[in-house]
């Protein structure tokens, strides 16, 4: 019987295309296929490093059929790399189900290997000056159901809280933080590793005013860090 293939979980840049490890580049060159959240986004990276490996799409809406054909490729001995649009796959990104099903299918024989690299979560906390001794990562906050409850939980927690936020909801989120957590310090990491990277710290009412007063600063990608009590 064939030896089964490996699924590599490959971290890719979160903005600056130079942020990719030598090992990630080698693996992306060597595998049989690269599974991409969006093949066009990943193609920019592959073009920059002259990587010609075939790509296949794998995203949040991929069917069960797609997943079983991926598992069959691995069963047949093919090596695959999983990438998302940016950062580390499976961290608020597609891939968890595939890895979980692969582990179910092959048990402890499954070969899933991480190729570590950028993640907005780790980049933000590393440059924040806020303790990461104990932190809670919430991913994206719920848009509607459970949102109020989450802010109450943030208020009551004495740990560092980190979550992802988009341009569409940053003001709404700062306003909710303002009504729930009062003067506790918050840090916003925006556009990390990109041209308009900035880290801004203050109370949520200060940050609300800061971002409200400047439409350009409401654009981009955000990590929100609430300081511990
Ligand atoms: N898997 C990715 C990772 O490891 O960072 C996260 C993917 S998640 C779908 C995308 C969210 O991550 C964005 O909405 C934003 O909150 C955060 N993010 C990604 N890149 C970022 C950047 N360059 N600066 C700030 N936040 C970023």
Image: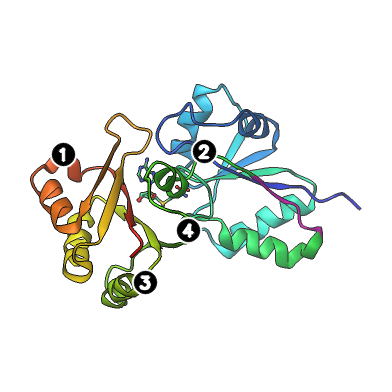
Residue 78 on image: x %, y %: 75, 44
User: In the displayed structure, does residue 63 sit left or right of residue 102?
Assistant: left
SS under mark 2: loop
Gap in angstroms between the C-alphas marked 3 and 2? 32 Å
* Farthest residue, direction right: 1
| Foreground of the two, 62 or 105 | 105
Which labelled disc corresponds to residue 60?
4
Label 2, on which residue? 12
Label 3, on which residue? 157
Marks 4 and 2: which is nearer the front? Answer: 2
Q: Are marks 1 and 4 in contact (CB under 8 Å)?
A: no
Residue 180 lies within the magenta run:
no
Density class for disc 4 (Cα within 10 Å; few <14, some 14-19, many ≥20) is few
User: In the displayed structure, does residue 206 sit left or right of residue 1?
Assistant: left
Task: Report the magenta residues as a range.
Answer: 109-114
Which labelled disc corresponds to residue 216?
1
Residue 95 figure quarter: bottom right
| Foreground of the two, 5 or 217 | 217
Marks 3 and 1: which is nearer the front? Answer: 3
Q: Do the residues labelled 3 and 2 touch (CB within 8 Å)?
A: no
Marks 3 and 2: which is nearer the front? Answer: 3
User: In the displayed structure, does residue 136 sit left or right of residue 116?
Assistant: left
From this view, report whether residue 19 is shown above or below residue 129: above
Gap in angstroms between the C-alphas marked 1 and 4? 30 Å
Residue 34 on image: x %, y %: 61, 40
Residue 11 figure quarter: top right
Sequence-first tag of 1 and 4: 4
Say if disc 1 is inside 8 Å of ligand 1.
no
């Amino acid at each position: 019987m064939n030896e089964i293939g490996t699924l590599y979980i490959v971290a890719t840049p979160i903005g600056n295309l130079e942020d990719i490890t030598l090992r990630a580049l080698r693996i992306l060159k060597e595998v049989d296929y690269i599974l991409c959240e969006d093949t066009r986004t990943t193609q920019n990276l592959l073009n920059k490093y002259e990587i010609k490996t075939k790509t296949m799409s794998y995203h949040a809406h991929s069917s069960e059929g797609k997943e079983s054909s991926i598992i069959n490729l691995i069963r047949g001995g093919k090596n695959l790399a999983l990438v998302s649009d940016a950062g580390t796959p499976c961290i608020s990104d597609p891939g968890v189900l595939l890895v979980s099903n692969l582990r179910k299918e092959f048990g402890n024989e499954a070969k899933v290997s991480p190729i570590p690299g950028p993640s907005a979560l780790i980049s933000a906390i590393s440059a924040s000056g806020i303790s990461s001794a104990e932190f809670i990562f919430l991913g994206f906050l719920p848009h509607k159901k459970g949102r109020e409850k989450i802010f109450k939980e943030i208020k009551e927690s004495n740990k560092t809280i980190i979550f992802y936020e988009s341009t569409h909801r940053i003001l709404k989120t700062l306003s909710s933080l303002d009504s729930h957590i009062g003067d506790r310090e918050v840090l916003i990491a925006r556009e990390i590793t990109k041209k308009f990277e900035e880290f801004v710290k203050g109370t949520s009412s200060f940050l609300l005013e800061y971002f409200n007063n400047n439409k350009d600063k409401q654009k981009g990608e955000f990590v929100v860090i609430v300081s511990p009590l």
